[in-house]
Image (tube, rainbow, N blue to C red):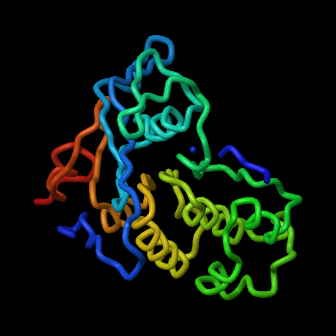
Amino acid sequence: MVIYLSIRLPFFSDSSNNNSKIMKNNLLEIDSVILEFGSRRILQDVYLKSETGKITGLLGRNGTGKSCIFKILFGELMSTSQSVRINGNSLITTKRQPKKIRCLPQSNFIPNYLTIKRALSDFDVDFSDLVMHFPEFKKDYKTKLINLSSGQRRIIEIFVIVTSQTDFCMLDEPFSQIMPLHVETIKSIIEREKINKGIIITDHMYKHITELSDDLYVINNGKTYLTKSDRDLETLGYVPKRN
């Protein structure tokens, strides 16, 4: 098997759904992060957690360090100081097991020459499940990813990360290049899959994040803040204050 490395108040959704019971609760945490590039400090006093059955949203303006947090969690970036733990066990090295954590990066990560059939097989994902949500792929089982549109390819990459068997998945800008109708379908899949895993998600289309999130963090001045209402987004300067 080929493994690819990638990483309601208005916010709080109902955790109930029709899936089977959660088999095991897992907890992913990151804190004590200090990240600097040259003389510029990007992150400090960061805390974020993800747990089985919940969608954790992460918002922040461009350049505030959202993708850096994802890369630290996924082991692709080492900071001056950091603590990453799963169920209280520290992840000391940069190695991450796909069964523990997967990451959807902003860029494409599945090789162009692979077919949809092969990509789904490598992630042990069911083609019939894909077609149930996106029937337009029914005749594309053997189509290579290079022959798909950018939006279609993004759907395939989102789908394999979100529906694969893993304890946690992180989604970095999943809704970019996706048609509005498909965005709603992807959101429903994310809601379905949270029963089996913890999900961390960030996107500049922030209203989708606030709608999905059970817990919502905002990065401001290098620190993370757990929000309680939409007013917190205004207080932290993420959205303009209402008159």
Front-most of residues 237 and 108: 108
To which quarter of the image does residue 143 belong?
bottom right
The quarter of the image holding the C terminus is bottom left
149 is higher (above) or lower (below) than 107: below
Which residue shows up at 55% across the image and 63% down it?
Answer: 162
Task: Give the quarter of the image for residue 128.
Answer: bottom right
Relative side of 194 to 149, left or right: left
The location of residue 136, given as percent across then percent down, is 70, 86
Whether 197 is drawn above or below 218: the answer is below
Q: Among all residues in the image, which is located at the extreme left?
A: 243
Q: Residue at x 52, y 64 (%)?
A: 175
x and y percent of residue 53 in the render? 35, 62
**What residue sits 52% from the left and 82% below the top?**
181
Closer-to-camera residue (198/221): 198
Where 169 sits versus 64, above or below? Answer: below
Determine whether 93 is above or below 62 in the image. Answer: above
Tell whether 210 sits left or right of 107. Answer: left
Q: What percent of the width, then of the height, locates residue 180?
A: 51, 77
Residue 159 spot, x, y in % from top left: 61, 67
Question: Depth check: 20 or 84 in front?
Answer: 20
Residue sticking out furthest to the top: 39
